[in-house]
């Protein structure tokens, strides 16, 4: 059974004797108020806060956290009051104990989503002090270790919650050993059968492993000595849940989960890590593609190490991790170790005890509307890696992996994002699509005439950037709609002799919008450009009956909810088909916003579309009801032989298509070209025809023509 002396022994190396006295005082107080209470196991309750504190001492947490460990259950489970704790141990300790208590008060409800929602509120309520979470993790760990005493009906809920929230949380904070232990304990409860299978396979291998392991350690030691590298070697096992996950994801059986054979080399100096790597690689052949340098490129939670896989002395795969003592400590204790090392000279000490931005962000920004979405976000944020970048002033920006210069710009300010033109990363100029890496120092280059483009969306991963770009693109679409609508309306009316630049006409138009309850002229133009208002209606208000003169328009433009324009219908003039590529129904298409001539629709493969300003491109798709046939032109290169023309026309007739025009031209005494203009239903229909024509024995090639005036081709047969 754990004793106070054990804890004192652990904290003595890093605490003053005055601090230790305070810890002893907290122990005495806690023992007094918990006196007589029992755990589910029947043991004295005090064992629990002692064990929790012992875990915290292993991570070398500060005095306040250690005291909190001892007191963490006093407010909830004893007669101790807020006031008692505050007056005896100070406000700091009280806030921590209070935070842990609040997290602990989450009701185990039948709805898991509900719990996550409470968890969110409670994390916020803890005052965002990361020590609360670490104490809570230690508390959870000890409760998990004693899960066998928990009543049966509580076990599964406890394990589920541990697996889904606490283990990822420990991972996010970089406390690897807490994560793996929480996972294995939960795994055993949640998947008892699978756990047992792995445990059995494992126990069978254990004695083999021990012999093998000492063999390898001996060989490694010999090598390191040869190179005068001071290091200790550990063998290690992947945790059972890790093995299980690997078996699932790679569909392997137990024998093939090779990094069970894993060794760790721990050196004094960083340079020795690379020397040790050299020693390992010169002894055993490295497996290509399996080397990772997390020393040069640390993981987002601060983890550093060299990972390599080699073919060991018995022809089997062996994983070796190489790191310094300091790195090892960080790998074990995560953020807690950071306090001691990396951040000991950080200018803002307060920030050290704060929850990382990435976790706070989800707690801050996620709405409570959709708990499912929230919990997914928690998992995503906790599991996804982050890149740590800096502003030129040295401020840290934590961004999800895959973030670009644009994401960075939007993380500073929407205006910076909207006018982002490029970036300077570590003093080199980079495009806005540049993917940031940890350690990058990023300066954003802005340009006042810059504006967000739709295809920026391809380069961003943060939701802030996505939202801002979408709304900016939408706004520019609105202003385009106003321009286009106004322009076309102006020209239409002018063609009927109405000049809306004249005062009386613009006034009449204003009367019209009042009558129609349209808010403003701009809204009128938008409605007009969206085909929500027909020219006929406006003209008839101006006293012109257009029915007699009305033209038949081929197509219309509608902006649907996804902002893509929909091509089809038959009542307006906003869409034209580009002559350069003559799209037909079913082709992949894209729109180009012209000023005053509506939208011209091109095939996505059209060369001309490559040249135009991407900001004026707009997604386009076909309306399914667009049934009218379109004309398309084909060139059939064939051997010149009697009857070929009738063969070609027969095939076209068989496919239920009509020939509008047909011309032929002799190329040589043997070859000729047949030019056809056909009516087809859609791209599939056309493809069928092209395929049938190509299969004719005398046909060499069938080509779809972009723009060809058939009249210019002489009939030469
Ligand atoms: Mn507890």
Image (cartoon, grey):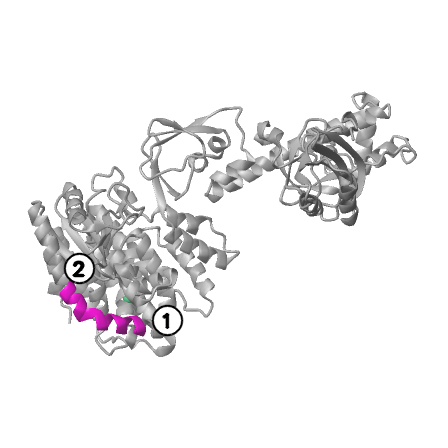
Mark 2: give few (<14), some (14-19) or many (20+) Cα within 10 Å.
Answer: some
Q: Residue furthest top?
A: 502
- For mark 1, give the secondary structure: helix
Q: Report how far apart the C-alphas of labels 2 and 1 lie in the structure.
A: 28 Å
Left or right side of 455 for 68: left
Which sits in the foreground, 459 or 6? 459
For disc 1, does the CB lie below 8 Å from ligand 1? no
Q: In the image, residue 179 lies at what x, y percent?
A: 29, 60
Would residue 203 be counted in the magenta stretch? Answer: yes
Q: In the image, residue 603 lies at what x, y percent?
A: 65, 36
Residues drawn in magenta: 196-212
The quadrant where ligand 1 appears is bottom left
Q: In the image, residue 679 lies at what x, y percent?
A: 77, 41
Q: Is residue 26 above or below residue 630?
A: below
Mark 1: give few (<14), some (14-19) or many (20+) Cα within 10 Å.
Answer: some
What residue does disc 1 label?
190
What residue does disc 2 label?
235
Q: Quadrant of the C terminus?
A: top right
* Residue in the picture at 44% in, 69% down: 109
Q: Is residue 67 above or below residue 511?
A: below
Which sits in the foreground, 16 or 492? 492
Q: Quadrant of residue 53?
A: bottom left
Left or right side of 411 for 340: left
Circle on res. 136? none
Which sits in the foreground, 79 or 61? 61
Q: In the image, residue 607 lies at what x, y percent?
A: 60, 30
Please say if the residues under marks 2 and 1 sit with CB atoms less than 8 Å apart.
no
* Residue in the picture at 71% in, 40% down: 584
Q: Quadrant of the N terminus?
A: bottom left
Which sits in the foreground, 299 or 135? 299
* Residue in the picture at 71% in, 31% down: 598
Magenta span: chief secondary structure: helix
């Amino acid at each position: 059974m754990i004793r106070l002396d054990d804890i004192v022994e652990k904290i003595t190396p890093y605490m003053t004797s005055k601090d230790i006295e305070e810890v002893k005082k907290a122990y005495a107080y806690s023992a007094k108020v918990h006196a007589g209470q029992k755990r589910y196991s029947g043991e004295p309750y005090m064992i629990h806060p002692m064990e929790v504190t012992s875990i915290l001492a292993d991570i070398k947490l500060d005095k306040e956290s250690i005291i909190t460990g001892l007191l963490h259950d006093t407010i909830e489970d004893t007669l101790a009051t807020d006031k008692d704790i505050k007056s005896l141990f100070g406000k700091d300790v009280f806030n921590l104990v209070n935070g842990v208590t609040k997290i602990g008060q989450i009701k185990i409800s039948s709805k898991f989503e509900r719990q996550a929602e409470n968890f969110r509120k409670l994390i916020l309520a803890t005052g965002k002090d990361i020590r609360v979470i670490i104490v809570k993790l230690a508390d959870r760990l000890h409760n998990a270790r004693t899960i066998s005493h928990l009543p049966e009906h509580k076990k599964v809920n406890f394990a589920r919650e541990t697996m889904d929230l606490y283990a990822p949380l420990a991972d996010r904070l970089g406390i690897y050993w807490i994560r793996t232990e929480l996972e294995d304990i939960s795994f055993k409860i949640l998947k008892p059968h699978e756990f047992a299978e792995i445990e059995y396979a494992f126990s069978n291998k254990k004695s083999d492993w021990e012999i093998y392991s000492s063999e390898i350690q001996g060989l490694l030691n010999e090598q390191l000595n040869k190179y005068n590298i001071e290091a200790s070697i550990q063998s290690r096992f992947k945790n059972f849940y890790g093995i299980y996950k690997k078996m699932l994801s790679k569909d392997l059986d137990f024998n093939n989960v090779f990094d069970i054979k894993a060794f760790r080399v721990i050196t004094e100096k960083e340079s020795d890590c690379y020397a040790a790597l050299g020693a390992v690689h010169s002894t055993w052949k490295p497996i290509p593609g399996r080397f990772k340098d997390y020393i040069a490129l640390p993981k987002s939670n601060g983890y550093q190490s060299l990972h390599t896989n080699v073919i060991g002395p018995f022809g089997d795969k062996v994983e070796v991790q190489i790191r310094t003592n300091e790195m090892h400590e960080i790998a074990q204790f995560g953020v807690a170790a950071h306090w001691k090392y990396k951040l000991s000279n950080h200018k803002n000490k307060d920030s050290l005890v704060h929850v990382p931005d990435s976790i706070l962000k989800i707690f801050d920004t996620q709405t409570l509307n959709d708990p499912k979405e929230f919990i997914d976000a928690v998992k995503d944020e906790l599991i996804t890696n982050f890149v740590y970048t800096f502003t030129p002033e040295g401020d840290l920006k934590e961004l999800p992996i895959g973030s670009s210069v644009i994401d960075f710009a939007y993380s500073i300010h929407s205006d910076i994002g909207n006018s982002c033109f490029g970036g300077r990363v570590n003093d080199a100029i980079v495009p806005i699509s540049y993917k940031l890496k940890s350690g990058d120092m990023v300066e954003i280059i802005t340009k006042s005439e810059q504006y967000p483009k739709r295809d920026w969306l391809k380069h961003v991963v943060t939701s802030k950037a996505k939202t801002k770009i979408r709304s900016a693109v939408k706004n520019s679409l609105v202003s385009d709609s106003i321009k286009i609508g106004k322009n076309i309306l102006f020209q239409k009316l002018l063609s009927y002799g109405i000049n809306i630049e004249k005062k009386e006409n613009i006034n009449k138009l204003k009367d019209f919008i009042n009558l129609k309850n349209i808010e403003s002229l701009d809204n009128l133009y938008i409605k007009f450009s969206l085909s929500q208002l027909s020219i006929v209606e406006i003209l008839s208000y101006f006293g012109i009956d257009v029915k007699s003169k009305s033209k038949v328009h081929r197509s219309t433009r509608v902006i649907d909810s996804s902002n893509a324009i929909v091509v089809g219908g038959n009542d307006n003039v906003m869409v034209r088909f580009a002559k350069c590529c003559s799209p037909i129904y079913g082709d992949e298409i894209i729109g180009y916003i012209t000023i005053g001539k509506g939208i011209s629709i091109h095939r996505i493969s059209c060369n001309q579309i490559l040249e135009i300003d991407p900001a004026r491109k707009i997604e386009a798709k076909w309306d399914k009801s667009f049934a009218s046939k379109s004309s398309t032109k084909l060139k059939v290169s064939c051997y010149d032989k009697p009857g070929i023309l009738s063969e070609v026309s027969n095939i076209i007739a068989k496919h239920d298509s009509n020939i509008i025009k047909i011309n032929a031209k002799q190329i040589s005494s043997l070859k000729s070209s047949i030019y056809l203009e056909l009516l087809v239903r859609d791209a599939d229909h056309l493809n069928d025809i092209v395929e049938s024509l190509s299969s004719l024995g005398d046909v060499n090639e069938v080509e779809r023509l972009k723009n060809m005036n058939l009249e210019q081709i002489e009939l030469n047969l």
